[in-house]
Amino acid sequence: MRAMVFDGESPVLREAEMQDPAPRDGELLINVHACGVCRTDLHVIDGDLKHPKKPLIPGHEIVGTVAALGSGVTGFAMGDRIGVPWLGYTCGHCRFCTHGHENLCDAPRFTGYTIDGGYSTRTIADARYCFHLPEQYCDIEAAPLLCAGLIGYRSLVKAGDSARIGIFGFGAAAHIVAQVAKHQGRTVYAFTRPGDVAAQEFARRLGASWAGGSDECAPEELDAALLFAPVGELVPVALRGLAKGGTVVCGGIHMSDIPSFPYALLWEERRIVSVANLTREDGESFMKIASEHKLAIETTAYPLACANEALADLRNGTLTGAAVLTMI
């Protein structure tokens, strides 16, 4: 199989020919058709997330078809189209797993971080953590659903029944969750880098009632703010725009330091919460929404060998929507 490999030191991936993996009990061998390029991949490659598997095949927004089944696999058959997300394994017996919070498992494994991922033509995954995908999305469209969509959805759930939602950082996750929020009857306000007119037009096209720079104020107070830009300085900015009782949801796995801010910004029962990983229940719930309401998924496709170019474009903020690697 062909793969793009991170050796653990240089942020530049190398292209390699590798032996096909073989599925063990409970695992699937998957012919990869597409794999999304996520900001979390950058955090792994740039050293923000410590202790990755070395060497590592990154990628955790995997779309492919089942090529072989390990013994004991149920729910999947040869040729099924499936998706593989970030959460690749949980222990099942820690206090978090046994109380419905497997996203906080004490001994998890993560696709494209501690398990080889989808920047390759073939991969292995634990069948229990894979999803069937809505048929109306092609492979390239389906890939961003598996992290950008799922983490965006979990962030929106953390916002509760908030009617007025501010979204900071209008990239892969934001452009999906904005459509879900709009579908649910909420009002969406999009905050982009100051002066990024293209991103603001993109947000309005996908249903935002207002779009402006993060140095501007929305036309009304927000009930919740979802932060997808990994910029800690945006936390107090978002707090300033919240109504009483509002929530700031930090949707990224890594963020720069949050600066100090006056307690008055937090008072009146405002809250700051983070989102960690996902649960399989999140996946099932979100895929149901995506199946019932066709989401417009904006992508830029790159051949597998151009993974470094895709990562650079994401790092430099030149993408609209999501980057996706294609294998066939």
Image: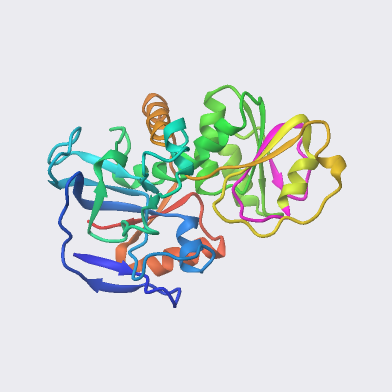
Q: How is the image coloured?
A: rainbow
x 30%, y 63%: residue:
304
**Frontmost residue, 133 versus 212:** 133
Determine which quarter of the picture holds residue 65.
top left
* Secondary structure character of the magenta stretch overall: loop
Q: Position of residue 188 (x, y in %)?
A: 64, 33
Vertically, is 314 above or below 237?
below
**Frontmost residue, 73 versus 182:** 73
x 51%, y 68%: residue:
47
x 49%, y 42%: residue:
151
Taking the magenta stretch, the answer to whether it contains residue 218 is: yes
Q: Position of residue 84 (x, y in %)?
A: 32, 46
The residue most toward the bottom is: 10
Left or right, 131 with respect to 39, comes to left
**Frontmost residue, 167 versus 85:** 85
Left or right, 178 with respect to 95, comes to right
Q: Position of residue 2 (x, y in %)?
A: 22, 66
Vertically, is 294 above or below 126?
above
Determine which quarter of the picture holds residue 76.
top left
Magenta stretch bounds: 211-233
x 15%, y 56%: residue:
22
